[in-house]
Image (cartoon, coloured by chain):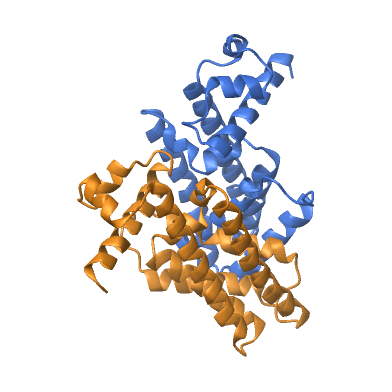
Chain colours: A blue, B orange
Amino acid sequence: MTTTQTKKQQIYEAAARLFRDKGYSATSMRHLAEAVALKASSLYNHIGSKEELLRDICFENAHKYLSGLQAIAMTRDSNLDKIKSLIDLHLDMATEDITSVTAFNDEWRHLSEPWLSDFIQLRKDYEKGFLEILEAGMNAGEIHRADAHTLLYTILSSIRWLYDWRKPEKPMDTERIKQQISNFLVRGLVN
Amino acid sequence: MTTTQTKKQQIYEAAARLFRDKGYSATSMRHLAEAVALKASSLYNHIGSKEELLRDICFENAHKYLSGLQAIAMTRDSNLDKIKSLIDLHLDMATEDITSVTAFNDEWRHLSEPWLSDFIQLRKDYEKGFLEILEAGMNAGEIHRADAHTLLYTILSSIRWLYDWRKPEKPMDTERIKQQISNFLVRGLVN
């Protein structure tokens, strides 16, 4: 990784944190420059604009989720194991890459057209793939039958608190927490 | 219910919707007046200020959750059944009272002191009561043993999507969705 790439990743992470804590609209390039200890003029050597930053973060994450889904869907695992892998994918993204919060929660709503529509389409593609596995799992008797949309939104929503975990009173034992959430959700799904 | 009370409730509901969709900071009294078809000057016959409105909504909901918890804790139900009732309380509040979103999601962060500290204390009291039932359920062997905080946050987070459900493509079959979420979570908890 070159120094430029490292700096760019630092900027992405700082931006994602600011967007989450202040909201996209209230975050200025000056806040961002301060957060990464750069002058505003130097910041523009690395990134074009706040909106370009939002776009890069949103689409990079959307593609990570989609390629994760595609890799999981292609395995010969049972449908239940595929869902387990998808839950792990979300838990890993939530705990390892702070920029995923921007794409996952609400900040993507600030994208302008045509990017907003493109992003919404990627989300729909992702949800469609996830729903297909849930439904295949129900048809195979592996997953308790229920409305697949309800299960999907409940699963995705259930890990949202991990993104908002700002000031833990004690450091998180991340691996243990991920394991317990995954077990809880899988027990809820299994037939 | 008098007409004044009805109007006040309408104003609360319109405010909660605006706070959710635009954010508290970006919502003006003019937006609110438009939403309830009043002149800004008439709006002040019903409410004092935007901040007072936020306070009323947050504390009214916090007390509803707390009194619900107290009533449930006092029953002679099993711990698992108490948790089931708490899940139902959240599902009912999420689907029946739009103002609960303000207290449940992020808008309460805009409260000023001393109300912010008071509100955080009420949330802590609520979480403490919920955690005690979870732990009693684990000790009684009714609930699968796990970190109670992880279970609590995962349960509360899991129904958050119901609040953000803005434009359903088809009308929600609310009772069925509530039942399915509840079943899914309870299956995940049970030992």
Is A100 left, or right, of A136 in this rendering?
right
In this rendering, is residue B49 above or below A19? below
Residue at image x 57%, y 77%? B84
Question: How many dots with numbers?
Answer: 0
Place of residue B31 in the rendered image (x, y in percent of width and height, measured from the top left):
29, 43
Visible residue check, residue A145: no
Quarter of the image where the N terminus of chain A is located: top right
Is A60 left, or right, of A180 in this rendering?
left
Q: Nearer the viewer, residue A165 or B71?
A: B71
Visible residue check, residue B123: yes
Is A168 left, or right, of A68 in this rendering?
right
Q: Nearer the viewer, residue A50 or A99?
A: A50
Is A56 left, or right, of A162 in this rendering?
left
Q: Nearer the viewer, residue B63 or B98?
A: B63
Place of residue A9 in the rendered image (x, y in percent of width and height, measured from the top left):
66, 25
Q: Nearer the viewer, residue B65 or A160?
A: B65
In which image quadrant can residue B122 be found? bottom right
Place of residue B189 in the rendered image (x, y in percent of width and height, measured from the top left):
65, 72
User: Going by the picture, which residue comes out furthest to the bottom?
Assistant: B76
Residue at image x 26%, y 51%? B43
Residue at image x 69%, y 44%? A95
Residue at image x 39%, y 73%? B175
Place of residue A27 in the rendered image (x, y in percent of width and height, measured from the top left):
52, 28
Quarter of the image where the C terminus of chain A is located: bottom right
